[in-house]
Image (tube, rainbow, N blue to C red):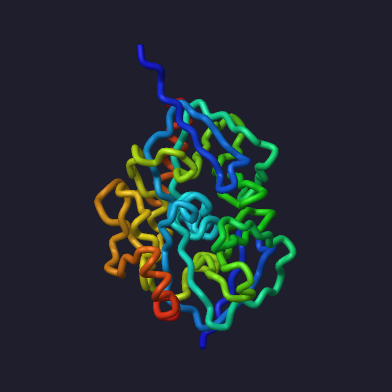
Amino acid sequence: MTTFSGQCLCGAVQFHGSGAGGVTPCHCGQCRRWAGGGPFMPTHFESGVIMEADETLVWYRSSDEGERGFCNVCGTSLFWRTPGAGSQMAVNVSTLGDNHGLKISAHVWAEDQPGWYAFADNAPRMTAEDFRENSAEVIHD
Amino acid sequence: MTEPVEITGRCLCSVVQFTAKKAGAVDICHCGMCRRWGGGPGFGVEPEGLTWQGEENITVHRSSDWAERGFCKICGTGLFYRLTAPGVAYMNINAFLLDDQTALTLQTEIFIDEKPDLYAFAGDRTCLTGEEVVAAFTQAHATGT
């Protein structure tokens, strides 16, 4: 399996992981608001995220279901995970650079997407409910 | 006489909020820095008459020689991108901070030359390369428009 390395804008948070799955842009209101303007586009590593440098990584508990990790120096939106999930987390795909070769496997929380923008790909659009039922298949595509 | 509608918005945790007179149309930025910072291309609007509340919760990071990015230090919400050159007053804010996003429209895609093949937006609109954006901005500021 290919290992991917990632880092935030300022380089203070560095990590790697392998077994990267499909990218699942999330259109929910929380992700759009959090992610510097724009749907948050994550991948997941089968290996989980292995941190190399994480002193500036902080977590915000954004809901009952999730917490969001960001660098407190540069503000890069890095990770989303279920509280208690340890190293299993959704990883901002753009922190891996541009040569990862990953593809969008599904758009999720599609029912929350405002009507004034649309992505051009044909990947499935899944509601929150669809995704919760089928997440394992979608993220490890 | 109708009062102008006030635009309001906030970060995820609501410690940072703002009011503005006008939000403007959305420009999408595909540059590598915006994408790394936010997790996807940046959706920005240029507000008019913006006032922040809870500004003490904003961390500002000098992300390049020419710009800085502000975010909420509690929840990490990306708030704004601002040019730092003296005499230049350009800032855009995260379009999804707005409490009411129903009236937003997509205007332009910029730094289209940095967009990866991973995604694309449907529909036709003006798309500018990084070079074209910088040239247009420099021109606008040189002539004072």
Front-lying residue, B1 or A6: B1
Q: How many marks?
A: 0
Front-lying residue, A78 or A62: A62
User: Taking B135 as reference, is A16 left or right?
Assistant: right
Residue drawn at x 32%, y 51% is A117
Q: Quadrant of residue A22?
A: bottom left
User: Taking B15 as reference, is B92 left or right?
Assistant: left
Residue drawn at x 37%, y 65% is A107
Position above or below: A27 against B89 = below
Q: Is residue A125 visible?
A: yes
Position above or below: B77 against B101 = below
Residue drawn at x 40%, y 64% is A128
- Residue B8 screen position, x and y as percent: 49, 33
- Residue B26 screen position, x and y as percent: 39, 42
User: Residue farthest to the right?
Assistant: A55
User: Residue farthest to the top?
Assistant: B1
Front-lying residue, B30 or B4: B4
Residue drawn at x 42%, y 63% is A25
Front-lying residue, B143 or B45: B45
Position above or below: A134 against A55 = below
Q: Quadrant of residue B25?
A: top left
Q: Quadrant of residue A133?
A: bottom left
- Residue A16 screen position, x and y as percent: 61, 76
Q: Quadrant of the C terminus of chain B?
A: top left
Q: Is residue A102 visible?
A: no
Q: Quadrant of the N terminus of chain B?
A: top left
- Residue B3 screen position, x and y as percent: 40, 17
User: Residue farthest to the bottom?
Assistant: A1
